[in-house]
Amino acid sequence: NNGNWQIEVKTTNSKEPQTIHISSKTSEITLENVLFGEVWLCSGQSNMQQPVKGYHGQPTFGSVMATAKSNNANLRLFTVDRIGSKTPLQDVEKFTAWQQASPNSVSDFSAIAYFFGLELQEILDCPVGMIHTSWGGSSVQAWISKEVISAYQNVNLDDVDITKTTNHIPTALFNAMINPLIPYTIKGALWYQGESNRTEPDNYKKLFPAMVKDWRTRWGIGDFPFYYVQIAPFLYDGNNDVFQAVDNSAFIRETQLQCLDLIPNSGIAITMDIGDQYCIHPPKKKEVADRLLFNALNQTYGYKTIDYAGPIYESLELKDGGIVLMFKNAEIGLYSYGELTGFEIAGADKVFYPATAKIVAQKDVFVKSDKVPNPVAVRYAWRNWIMGTLFGANLLPASSFRTDDWDEATQVKK
């Protein structure tokens, strides 16, 4: 007997703090100021880790006012210490504890997790707990169990120094920062990661859904909601002219969008309009949290009047020497702040030229270029860095996309 035990408690609807007494023949423990409510797990890399106060020289917009107004007895925060392990651990670091939302606790807490939790608590009017477990620069491989990742690659950590590049060691963060949390009851999970895997979209398309499936299996509470962020545009390596997968983050964004169909009960927050050209940590974390929240409110909590999805490319039609693009999630129409930009069009030679684009019939986009008299394919926002211009009428942005599946293509700048 290793001393581990667990109980299931019938929760109360009361928002008042509860007291739990646990006793045996020889000892008694009392837990005070306990709340019952909704708990969300938040994980990923540095954009999830970014605190409300921001990083050095990399701010979080709205942080000062958010911190000043943060006292909330019904919002509880928990941050898992950043450590790795070669084998699955059963507990988190002993100095980690739940904290009530306050200026002291909120400042260093994940901005996305905090903003999501705050809004959810106010809307549901019930206690909310946010568990934050992320590590900047981490790869998806680090968050996957050995049993699952071994189907994709060999994992032998016998001679690995776990203290070096911990956030890239396969299984290391799952072992130390996810496994100890199982089976703590959660409502769902939020995920913001992918920058560290941007050069391997095909591999990510296998590993990411496998990770989600594994977590759900281990928690044993069914396909709990899993909402994630598509990485934002950014000028990786100072290069915006690349067009191939190894260098162009549009491919990993495409993969993340495709994972919607591979991960049941999931949702995505598109960030094409809130990236930063020169900072990989965009400051608009509240907007990201809101878009995750829209998913949760509609899909998890039944607020069906809350739109959560932007337009997604669905099909095309050749017409009048151009291409008409049709979209899902565009029933109430499309919108653009000014001119539609970022569209390129190609013929059978697979050479893409800049193209004009305009919204037609309120819900389609017509794309054309005089340089391409017989077009067959369109790409939108197919760059490391670009500011998205295409939105739904609900003001949620479209992802970058392509209508082709070509492995090789070229690009003409002008």
Image (tube, rainbow, N blue to C red):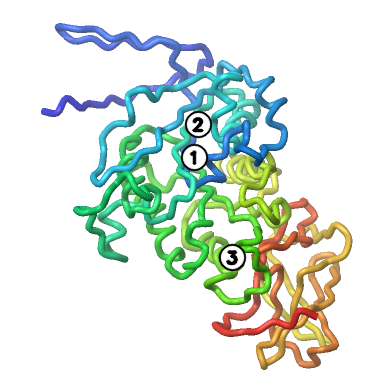
Q: Is residue 274 visible?
A: yes
Residue 44: horizontal and vertical position, in percent? 48, 47
Q: Is residue 213 visible?
A: no
State the CA–CA distance, disc 2 to disc 3: 30 Å
Query: Please, is residue 168 above or below residue 48 in the view?
Result: below
Image point (64%, 55%), residue name: 232
Circles 2, 3 touching at the beta carbon (< 8 Å) = no
Of the 4 image quadrants, the one containing the C terminus is bottom right
State the CA–CA distance, disc 2 to disc 1: 7 Å
State the CA–CA distance, disc 3 to disc 1: 23 Å
Of callouts 3 and 1, which one flags the residue occurring earlier in the amino acid sequence?
Answer: 1
Is 250 or 131 nearer to us in this picture?
250
Of callouts 2 and 1, which one flags the residue occurring earlier in the amino acid sequence?
Answer: 1
Crowd class of label 1 (few under 14; some 14 to 19; many from 20; radius 10 Å):
many
Is 59 or 57 nearer to us in this picture?
57
Image point (48%, 12%), residue name: 17
Instruction: Name the kind of residue labelled 3 in the image.
Output: Ser
Give SS at disc 3.
loop
- Which label sits on residue 130? 2
Label 1: which residue?
42
Is 181 or 122 nearer to us in this picture?
181
Label 3: which residue?
249
Q: Residue furthest right?
A: 338
Residue 261: horizontal and vertical position, in percent? 51, 63
